[in-house]
Image: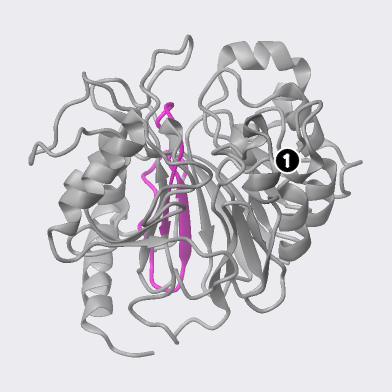
Amino acid sequence: MQNRQRLGLLGIVFSVSALSAIGAQEVQDDVIGQPLTPWSEGALDIHHISTGKGNATFVILPDGTTLLVDAGASTIPIPYATARPDDSRRPGEWIARYIEHFHPGPSPVLDYVLLTHFDPDHIGFVDQNSPLSSSGAYRLSGITDVGERIAIRTLIDRGSPDYDYPRPLTNEIVDNYRHFLADHSSHPGMRVERFIPGRNDQITLQYDPTGFPGFEVRNLASNGVVWTGVGTNTRQQVPSLESLAPEDFPSENLLSNAIRVSYGPFDYYNGGDLTGIPNIGNPQWQNMETPVARAMGPVDVHVVNHHGSIDPASPFFLATLRPRVHIIPAWSPTHPAPSVLKRLLSERAYPGPRDVFILEFREPTKATIGARAEQVKSDGGHVVVRVNPGGASYRVFVLDNSSESFTVKAIHGPYESR
């Protein structure tokens, strides 16, 4: 492996912080009731951050490259949707502090940010009461809160540079986001790109590109275009807009960016709010899960689309992916839908064991679902997937989200990758 200055710094920081956190224990000796040990070189860490207000996933690739998928902040009051750890800070601030705690480098920087789509629980809700940035050019919420605190090298979204599909994106949330981009484009260092389906070279290892064979981030879908599974070829799932009535134009959820992260035999899926079973009377082309599943094939860890809300996890999708682990990034009392949890747990969907982890399983939701709610492995907390070097096995950690102690509440696995 190439001896890069960055990796040397990572190693120094890791050694010092690990010894400080766990004393005389072995570096990989994670213990329930103690803080999670830091990332180590060669591992793939995938942190699903539980703020109770939206989606955010912080990924540390095997060479220390960092990726943030979404930074949501749905701050409109919703009954029973309390903030985690509490509401003393905005969700984007909690996300930034989480990244700063677990970041492997000497000074936090995000090599990549991928925004799956432009809904507030994925990029941040803003209104006239949202505080202004230090420059005064935009308001702080979600991704703009993170970007105010942590440098971003490459930001990837579905709309750059025109933000005009399926119609011009002009609302308070997207306008604020674009003000953020314009303000940061005046400073060297942040590049903004459009997510391109089919590619496997848009998110790559930055510090040791050849040191970890079998690692890949594959772009699966975006803006209704889906990878075919062959080379970088794609096909258009959404019909031409000219052929559609305005009420049938694709939604933000349907247009979500989706990725597969592979490391040797290990595969992980995250697709934002990508749509599955169409609503009654809606056209079948709105089922984005089926073409994605056909291209992607089986995975070990499946992040359930759209927080597990009504339409995702179609029978075909589940039968094709056959995940050992399901993660539901739920935060609202409407997530997950009883029918979705039933499908996830059913061995009629596909045979074999499976474990379900829910970031925030609200009490009203449990009461609605009934006895099946007791079958999940975790009903609250940050969920961390730690893949061992080479990708042959992985573990799942549930961390306390009631404070910033990051205490391990539960350890599951090791699971064998397929």
| 173 shown above or below 59 | above
Q: Is residue 405 visible?
A: no
- Residue at (28, 77) in percent of width and height: 7
In the rendered image, residue 400 lying in the magenta stretch gets the answer no
Read off the magenta span.
32-59
| 194 shown above or below 246 | below
Name the residue nearer the viewer: 303 or 375: 303
Q: Is residue 352 visible?
A: yes
Q: Which of the 4 image quarters holds residue 349?
A: top right
Identify the residue under disc 1. 276
Instruction: Name the quarter where the N terminus is drawn.
Output: bottom left
Kindly identify the amino acid type of the residue bearing the numbered disc 1: Gly
Furthest residue in direction left, as rendered: 135
Residue 367, x across and y down, in percent: 67, 11
In the rendered image, residue 48 lying in the magenta stretch gets the answer yes
Asked if residue 279 lies left or right of residue 2, the reply is right
- Residue at (55, 30) in percent of width and height: 330
| 153 shown above or below 382 | below
- Badge 1 crowding class, 10 Å Cα cut-off, few under 14, some 14 to 19, many 20 or more, is many
| 113 shown above or below 123 | below
Name the residue nearer the viewer: 195 or 350: 195
Asked if residue 283 lies left or right of residue 395, the reply is right
Dominant secondary structure of the magenta stretch? loop
Residue 362, x across and y down, in percent: 55, 18
Furthest residue in direction right, as rendered: 348
- Residue at (68, 32) in percent of width and height: 376
- Residue at (84, 42) in percent of width and height: 315
Name the residue nearer the viewer: 21 or 195: 195
